[in-house]
Image (spheres, rainbow, N blue to C red):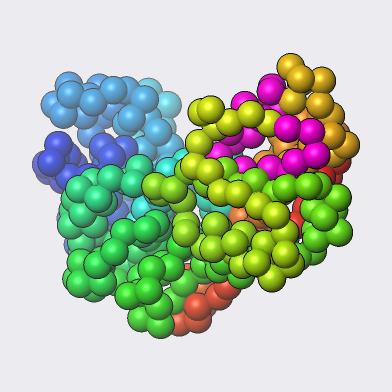
Amino acid sequence: MADKLIILDDQLPVSKYRQIILSVNTAIKEGKLKPGDKLPSINHICKKHKVSRDTVINAYADLRTKGVISSSPGKGYYVETTNIKLTHNIFVLFDELNAFKEDLYHSFLRNLGKNTEVDIYFHHFNRKLFNRLIKESKGNYTTYVIMPAKFAGTLEQIGELNGNIIILDQLPGDLKGIYPSVYQNFEKDTYNALLDGRSLISRYQRFTMIYPGGKEPEGQYLGFLKFCSDTGTTHRLVNDVKGLTIEKGEAYFVIWDSHLVWLVKQAKKKGLTPGKDIGIVSYNDTALKEIVGNGITTISTDFCTMGKILAQLIRSDSQQSIENPSKLIQRGSL
């Protein structure tokens, strides 16, 4: 009987590993599995559902860690308890995974507490993929954490989800005040951070921002332009490093790390020292930027704090919208 309760579906967006766990938990909740009942063997599930041994072993290990099942050497796996307390089943949709989003995610997991399950997906700024993942997740989770990035017109689609919804990082205008959120105010953050570094920036003859556009928040360059206008700073705005010649006495504000690497390499070729001959400000802090050269000055939100606040909103079922703090982190490059 237990064999028929393990249901795996290739069409579901949920991993096979997670589907095995959900199958066992669902069968227990519905009274179809009781303490002492034997579960299908690892080999049997692998053969019947064409999944790897690691997938089944990891799923059973997860259930055993939570005390749901137990194992007997040479005999197999058995249901240990029907007392399953799953407080939150969470769908997380990130735009992409990078060093600082990884910090955010791990901080989120550390602060969630027990009795939670988390599935994470990435839309990679692809609206069709975003739409499909949202549609396929409907009804499968208690909580939905969504990074809509710069996508417009997502209100109706997100509103069809059944469960608690939290918007993360960028906050499009049509979602403001509708759902709880942990967000960045990119224009204000950029403007205030540059004001904090005004005395350093003023040492340079010109301030150049390399803003690539596309997926990047417009608030970044709006804050830059407002700062330059309010302080009378000579500036220029370019969208790529192609054709760009770096010059002594100029400060550069870069968004992409690839542009930062190019800038550091070009400075080295020309014998220009960051923090002395040229200035560099980068967006989003990473551990690596602490040690490159004499350290790269950054404007960054605290991604670990963002993850912690997100977990707190879920645990408390709060409806707050919280602006995550951001600041200028001054190092040797400016």
Residue 271 image point, x, y percent = 82, 20
Residue at 62 percent across and 59 percent down: it is: 224
Q: Is residue 317 above or below residue 238?
A: below
Q: Is residue 176 left or right of residue 35?
A: right
| Residue 256 highlighted magenta (yes or no) | yes
Q: In the picture, residue 34 is in which quadrant?
A: bottom left
Specify whether residue 1 is in view.
yes
Quadrant hosting residue 45: top left
Question: In x, y percent, where is residue 217?
Answer: 47, 57
Residue lying farthest top? 269
User: Depth check: 272 or 297 in front?
Assistant: 272
Nearest to the observer: residue 274 or residue 237:
237
Count all numbered tags in the image, as a single digit: 0
Q: Residue at x 68, y 31 (%)?
A: 246
Q: Residue at x 39, y 57 (%)?
A: 149
Residue 193 percent coordinates (x, y) = 72, 62
The magenta-colored residue range is 247-266
What is the x, y in percent for residue 301? Answer: 64, 58
* 231 horizontally vs 60: left or right: right
Determine whether, in the image, residue 53 is placed left or right of residue 171: left
Instruction: Judge by depth and name the residue closer to the eye, 147 or 253.
Output: 253
**Quadrant where the image shows the C terminus:** top right
Q: Which residue is found at the position 74% from the left and 67% from the top?
A: 231
Q: Is residue 72 left or right of residue 313?
A: left
Q: Quadrant of the N terminus?
A: top left
Whether 206 is among the magenta residues is: no
Quarter where residue 86 is shown: bottom left
Residue 260 vertical position relative to residue 43 in the rendered view, above or below: below
- Residue 37 in sight: no
The residue nearer to you, when weighing 159 against 290, is 290
